[in-house]
Every structure is written in structure tokens, then in C-alpha cells.
Amino acid sequence: MTGARVVAGRDPRTGGGIRVRIEDARIIAVERDGEGKGPWIAPGLVDLQVNGYGGDDVNAAEPSPERISAITAALAARGVTTWTPTVITGTEEEICARIAAVTAAALGDPAVAAAVPFVHVEGPFLSPIDGPRGVHDRAAIRPIDAEEVRRWTAHGRIGYVTVSPHDDDAPAQIARIVAGGVAVAIGHTHAAPERIAHAVDAGASLSTHLGNGISAELPRHPNPIWTQLADDRLRCGLIGDGHHLPPETFTAMARALGPDRGFLVSDAVELAGSAPGRYRTTVGGEVILTDDGRLSYPDTGYLAGSAVSLADCVHWVATRTPLGLDTAVRLATENPGRIIRDLTGGGFEAGRIAPGARADLALLDDDGALREAIVAGETVG
């Protein structure tokens, strides 16, 4: 139980003053006035795609609840108070073991239970083609299988699964997955635009890191990116590490998606938060991490994942695009929080500052850089 506390600063939405009154880890009142001083006060950040952080990997060869707890604590210190463990392509046994580790962590660690609403499974139903497949193991790629997804759910709560809807049976399988209570995202795909549209008609409602996990060269039009941007039924994740999407591309996509359809993700991997250097990873082999957070393969220069936190993404959007801090915060809090509420039937609250909510806050400097992280009313980090 925490004592009473008042956190005062400025509201990124209005620019005015805001005071958040906290008692026993909960927000009990939110007060606003016309003049603001101090840091920008945002809700705790919400990252819907995290593969690992700080040297721990959701997809470790030996997954464990302790790794999930360690990632939760490391992210909390960076202002990320809600996150979705992302399980990548593997055998069914490997996927189930990783899901079970997340479930065990939530059962044994209250911090994990409060931070993790569900698991995202990215694969194994992806494009087998080099390029769209990314670093996912080609040998483990297989056709979409709703029955396998159902078997996963025996090991834990699956929020959404990323698939490539490139084959004839994709719409029927997607419809079955959605009917079973798991949302479907489109990603790592070479599917033609009309197959993307059929997938959405069947119930797909999200796009995983739009603009990445796709062929390097595409027709001017039509192409799968335009199709996903144009369909109001899709909410689309955008990686904001400064390397996966150039500033102008990120800006154009965010503007096309409008105020509600886009959400910011880190897509962080195990090496995120590590010092620059040369490393060997379990997925992809040797990689180089530069001081600006670019993680790539030394021979090709191709990206090997993201090595930053969502807080770094907020700072990048605020300083390297014309979208502004308000938009950066909304993409990292309100919009992904709304997705979580939708996928849990309102059973998990995140991304809002409101009376009754857990007191998770991110205090930001003028440029959007993280100044202080508050979790359940207590400063961490």
C-alpha cells in the first residue's frame, strides 16, 4: 500500500496544468487548470509488441517466468507499464512453452499480472518468402491453422496472432480464429491486395508493424500497404525506432491512419537497452548494435530487430517528425490501450489517466524524453 501523493505537471493534450492525486496505488482524482508547469504527464506507456529487453528474451531456448518478470521490471523503469510478450515462429511445442512461461509469470508475480494483458504470437503462419518472412525460421513456417491456435489457448491468454493471408484457405481459417476469441493481425506477408481485403472481411482487425515484414520492392499501386492504410477496419502498428521507418514514411502513415487507427510499437528484441557492440543472438546469429540503436547484420546491413524501448520511440516521434508530442503520446498510450480494452472485453485497463485506474505514469521532458517512471504510484528506475 502506498501513501498519498500528488504528481503535478502539464497535459500533452491541452498544454494546461494537470495534478494527479494518488492513494494506495490508484488515481483518486485528476485536476486541471489553465497554466501548466513542470514535466509533461502521460499515462504509462503501452507496447503491444515486445520480443525481449535488457538481455532477456521471451523466445529464449529455455523460456522461464523469471525472464518475463525481468523484462517487466526493466520496461517499467523506462516508463512502459503495459506490454505484450511477443512469441515468434517456432514449433508448436516451442510456442506453447513460451506462452506457458508468460502465464506462470503472471500467476506468480503481481507486477507481471498488472502489466501483461495477453500474449501476441507473431507467426508461424507467415510468408515463406525471403524478405516478407524477415528473420523467422523458414523451416517452421506453415499454413494458417485455427485448430493449432485453439490448442495454444490451453496454455495462456492469446490476444492476437499475426498471419500472412496469402493462400486460398486464409479467410476461412481467420474467421475460425476470430470466432475462437483471438484477434488476427496481418503481417510478414506477400499477399496481394485483394487477399488482404478478403482477410479483413473475414475478421482480421490489426496490422503488425506496417511497412516492415514486406518485400523491399512493391508496385506503386495497388499494393498491400495502401490496402491496409485505406481500410478503416484495421488498426496498424508502426515501429518508431528511427530505423524501420524513415521519418517521412512514419509521418505519412500516421497521418493516413488518422487520430485513432495507428499505434506505436518498439518491436524490441533481447538486446534492446544494451550497450553498443557486436553480439551473437539465438535468432539470426551475429549482429551489430550501434550507439544510435540500430541493430543489424554485419554482412548485409539488414535490420535484426529493434533495440530501443517505447519511451525512445516517443522521443523519436516527438523530435524527428512534425507530428508533435501529443500525437506521440496518444500513439503510445491511448490508442494501444483502447485495443487492449477491446481484446479483453474491458477487462484490462491501460493507457489512460482517470480516477480508479492504477497510478501508472510517464513524466516527460519538453522533447518527449523520459524523466521519471511511476508504477502503481511509486517512482521506479
Image: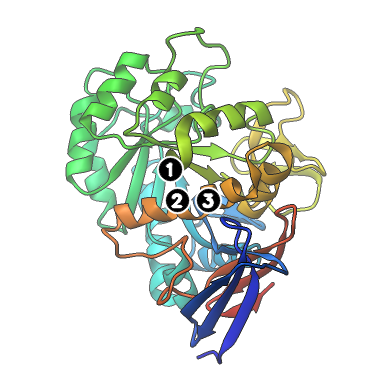
Foreground pick, 352 / 272: 352
Label 2 or label 1, whichever lies nearer to me, is 1
Whole-percent x and y of residue 53? 62, 55
- To which residue does mark 1 refer? 260
- Residue at image position (22%, 47%) is 150
Lateral position of residue 341 relative to residue 218, left or right: left
Label placed on residue 15: none
Q: Is residue 216 above or below residue 85?
A: above
Whole-number angstrom distance, CA of label 2 to CA of label 1: 9 Å
- Residue under numbered circle 2: 336
**What residue type is disc 2 on?**
Pro
Counting residues from the N terminus, which is met first, the one under dot 3 or under dot 2?
3
Depth check, front residue: 44 or 274:
44
Q: Residue at x 43, y 56 (%)?
A: 337
Q: Amino acid at mark 3?
A: Arg
In this picture, residue 125 sits left or right of residue 259: left
The answer to which image quadrant residue 156 occupies is: bottom left
Which residue, given by chain and number where applicable, does mark 3 sit on? Answer: 330
Q: Position of residue 6 (x, y in %)?
A: 60, 82
Q: CA distance from mark 3 to mark 2?
A: 9 Å
Q: Amino acid at mark 1?
A: Asp
Q: Please tell me whether residue 17 is drawn above or below residue 252 in the rendered image.
A: below
Mark closest to the chain's N terminus, 3 or 1: 1
